[in-house]
Image: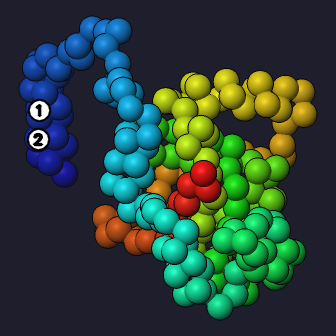
Amino acid sequence: MDVARNNILQRVHAALGVEAHRPLPPTDAPVFPPVVDAEARFRAEFVALRGEIIESAEALRAFLNAFPRIATDGAELTGKIVGEPNANVRECDLGVTGCDCLVAQTGSIIVSTLSAGGRALSVLPPTHLVIARREQIVPNLAAGMALLRKRYDKHWPSALSVITGPSRTADIEKILVMGAHGPKRLALYFAD
């Protein structure tokens, strides 16, 4: 027992004699490259995260026709109201919401309980469709938060979510699993 203990202590003592790696000094260099074309950057980041962009009204109709049960907050798409407002969201295949803004730097979508018709529509159905306008794209998260501060001032919604791609986890044995904590698919349609 003493031999094993001494062996461990000798290795610790030897390791203490080696100086640890010193981190580089802080810098003012940006972590992310600057956003030059906000829409192009958002699209690239969003698609890299496995988000789907629906490019046309025809493609939107085809996308919507693939889902038998659609829940929405009453949004009007393609000239008709899609789904059932206040439908039982747990039983629906698709949740359709609006959003507060789109963050170009990270390809993220910021939704609140006010912009997304509550909390359930963007979380419970296995597919989430966000309806946005191009002017909702902001360059970074700081600009997104500034927009929210201006919009909501002293009357903040009960919840904000920053959605960065479909739900995913790799907690178990480093195997990527989609849809673990929310929608497995995330799609976006620009309504303008």
Mark 1 residue crowding within 10 angstroms, few (<14) / some (14–19) / many (20+): few
Point out which mark residue 7 bears: 2
Pointer 2 with pointer 1, Cβ within 8 A: yes
| Mark sitting on residue 10 | 1
Question: The residue tagged with tag 1: helix, strand or loop?
Answer: helix
Does 8 sit left or right of 63 as displayed? left
Residue 10 in the figure: left or right of residue 54 = left
Rendering coords of residue 3 (x, y %): 11, 46
Q: What amino acid type is highlighted by mark number 2? A: Asn
Q: Amino acid at mark 1?
A: Gln
Q: How many marks?
A: 2
Q: Is residue 119 left or right of residue 94?
A: right
- Residue 116 spot, x, y in % from top left: 74, 56
Nearer-the-camera pick, 84 or 111: 84
Q: Is residue 127 above or below residue 19?
A: below
Numbered tag placed on residue 147 in the rendering: none
Residue 11 sits in which quadrant?
Answer: top left
Q: Residue at x 50, y 30 (%)?
A: 140
Query: In front here: 112 or 129?
Result: 129
Residue depicted at x 63% and y 83%: 93
Q: Residue most toward the right?
A: 155
Q: Secondary structure at mark 2?
A: helix
Does residue 182 show up?
no
Above or below 23: residue 33 = below
| Residue 76 position in % (x across, y down) | 76, 67
Residue 149 as seen in the image, left or right of residue 16: right
Residue at 38% x, 32% y is 37
The residue located at (52%, 81%) in the rendering is 62
Q: How far from the left and from the top, in percent, is residue 43? A: 40, 49
Asked if residue 94 is positioned above or below residue 158 in the image, the reply reads below
